[in-house]
Image: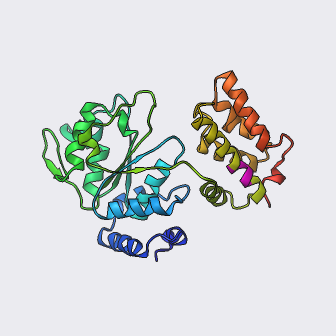
């Protein structure tokens, strides 16, 4: 077992899948020039069934589409999968102005000659990377047209004015999408058919505690349980429509706990990381009430961390 993949074994991920991953990594070594793009994630992903589905799909050459509400770990999973397979990662954050030129490349002058400045999708195809297509349901038609040929059985890209390139056999693409964000739209059937889809479940207590223990190994158990409970309370209120998802920000909560390590009071830290994410005064009051039931105002650093 590769040591860096031990967290998969700890979760009980199928051994046959892990052996296939090891074989994949041996079969497709990363070019030395691209090694800097193989990035260890800030935190491991926890969820055996989700990992097994994703790994099995990628081993068979399929592309993945990760759907779900905010804070379900879509990007964390995508980053972990690139790391698990030992592949260079290329992130494309789609927005209304993302066009084919940014994905494939654009003409540029080098030594008075026109050359192609390769885009993220081109490099991913060339070097066998994992392309993370963030908020793919914000892609406009020009960008989607590039993805159609890249993601289907043709596994090739026609570069206008240059040539056709075939995808490296290790290249894979992982799309992520949230529903209901401004600027998003329904994906057309032709694009969805090029993915296997994983619906990411909401965070649960066990997963949250795994994450908190991993990120804050010196955190006191009782404090970490309260932070996990706070997130779950906010998640429930968001599901019931009592608040928006602005305060439902796991990155913000983790950032707040990090500031507590420097000595900032937990009350002020959570205000920055959670409460102040709400700009509506009424909603902010609701979130503040939820926080007060979990995080006492007189808590200090010593009650959070065991030195």
- The percent coordinates of residue 289 (x first, y second) are 76, 33
Point out residue 20 in the picture as x, y percentages from the top left corner. 35, 73
Q: Is residue 196 above or below residue 287?
A: below
Query: Residue 139: horizontal and vertical position, in percent?
Result: 33, 34
User: Residue visible at 81% across and 50% down?
Assistant: 301
Which residue reaches farthest front? 240
User: Is there any visible trace of residue 169 in the rendered image?
Assistant: yes
35 lies left or right of 242:
left
- Which quadrant of the figure has residue 290? top right
The answer to whether any part of residue 109 appears in the image is no
Image: 32 above or below 283: below
Quadrant location of the C terminus? bottom right
- At a point 44% along the width and 36% down the height, the residue shown is 179
Where is residue 160 shown, x and y percent of the image? 14, 38
- Foreground pick, 267 / 180: 180
Q: Considering depth in this image, is 129 or 53 the residue closer to the camera? A: 53
Q: Residue furthest top?
A: 281
Left of 11 or right of it: where is 111?
Answer: left
The type of colouring in the image is rainbow
Whether the magenta-drawn stretch holds residue 225 is answered as yes
Q: Which residues, given as a range, are shown in magenta?
A: 224-228
Give the overall secondary structure of the magenta segment: helix
At 33% from the left edge and 56% from the top edge, which residue is drawn? Answer: 129
Towards the viewer: 181 or 253: 181
Residue at far right of view: 298
Q: How many marks?
A: 0
Front residue (pair 242, 179):
242
Quadrant hosting residue 293: top right
Residue 237 covered by magenta stretch: no
């Amino acid at each position: 077992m590769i040591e860096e993949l031990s967290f998969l074994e700890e979760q009980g991920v199928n051994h046959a899948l892990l052996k296939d991953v090891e074989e994949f990594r041996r079969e497709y070594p990363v070019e030395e020039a691209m090694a800097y793009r193989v990035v260890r994630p800030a935190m491991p992903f926890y969820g055996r069934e989700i990992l097994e589905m994703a790994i099995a799909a990628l081993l068979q050459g399929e592309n993945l589409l990760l759907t779900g509400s905010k804070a379900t770990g879509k990007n964390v999973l995508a980053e972990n999968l690139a790391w698990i397979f030992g592949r260079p990662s290329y992130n494309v954050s789609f927005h209304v102005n993302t066009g084919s030129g940014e994905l494939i490349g654009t003409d540029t002058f080098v030594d008075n000659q026109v050359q192609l400045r390769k885009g993220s999708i081109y490099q991913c195809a060339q070097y066998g990377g994992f392309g993370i297509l963030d908020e793919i349901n914000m892609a406009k038609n020009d960008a989607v047209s590039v993805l159609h040929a890249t993601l289907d059985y043709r596994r090739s890209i026609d570069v206008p004015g240059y040539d056709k390139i075939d995808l490296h056999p290790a290249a894979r693409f992982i799309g992520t999408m949230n529903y209901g964000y401004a600027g998003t739209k329904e994906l057309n059937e032709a694009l969805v058919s090029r993915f296997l889809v994983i619906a990411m479940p909401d965070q649960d207590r066990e997963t949250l505690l795994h994450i908190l223990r991993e990120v804050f190994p010196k955190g006191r158990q009782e404090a970490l349980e309260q932070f996990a409970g706070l997130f779950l309370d906010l998640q429930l209120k968001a599901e019931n429509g009592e608040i928006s998802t602005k305060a439902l920000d796991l990155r913000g909560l983790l950032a707040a706990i990090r500031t507590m390590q420097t000595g900032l009071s937990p009350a002020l830290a959570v205000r920055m990381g959670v409460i102040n994410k709400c700009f509506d005064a009424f909603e902010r009051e609701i979130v503040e009430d939820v926080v007060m039931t979990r995080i006492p105002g007189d808590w200090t650093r010593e009650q959070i961390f065991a030195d």
